[in-house]
Image: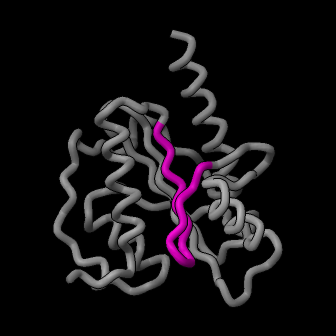
Amino acid sequence: MKKPIVMLLAAAGLGLALSGCAGPVESLETLETASSGIVQAAVNPGDFDSNLEGLCRYMEASDSVIGEKTEMSYKEIGAIGGYRYRFRFDGSTVQAEFYEFDLDNLDQKGQECLDSVGAKGFFSLLGNDVPAVLNGKFLMVYTDADTDEVNAAQKEKAEKLFRDFGKQAS
């Protein structure tokens, strides 16, 4: 019983740390709920602009995130933009965050963040290690405190879709 509570508190703390100046946190009751077992929609990732807005539209069209996106505080990690989606999936609160970096003009924070994610699969922010996935100039943070089979499979689908972004369908 203690483990789920600790995981929920850790996820909430991580969410607060990552949200920075993003504005008010919405109540769990107001979050949209995704149905369990979201099926990946047949969406060609090459049909979307190769920018943060295009990535968000692609992830929405592929049914891997739902609800309104909220602009995130992104300068702390050296990004040029960032958005977060919060929704309920299979009884758990999920946060999916997407950031874009200007690879030709990275500052020290951006370089350190991308190097860390590339080498270790996480970056450090405010003393916390934040697991993340890279796809070229994009970074995704997907947080779900529930790691059961259904939630883990949904996370894997979201990560695969994210990694496929920008690729042409064959």
Residue occupying the far bottom of the picture: 104
Q: Residue drawn 21% across and 42% down?
A: 37
Up the image or down, 97 lies above or below 92; here it is below
Residue 43 covered by magenta stretch: no
- Place residue 22 in its image quadrant: bottom right
- What sort of colour scheme is used for the picture? one colour
The image position of residue 137, as x and y in percent, is 56, 78
Q: In the rendered image, which quarter contains the C terminus?
A: bottom left
Up the image or down, 113 lies above or below 26; here it is below
Horizontally, residue 18 falls left or right of residue 70, namely: right
- Place residue 61 in its image quadrant: bottom left
- Front position in the image: 90 or 116: 116
Q: Residue drawn 32% across and 64% down?
A: 60
- Place residue 46 in its image quadrant: bottom left
Q: In the rendered structure, which segment of residues is drawn in magenta?
A: 131-144
Horizontally, residue 77 falls left or right of residue 7, namely: right
- Front position in the image: 90 or 24: 90
Q: Residue drawn 73% across and 43% down?
A: 128
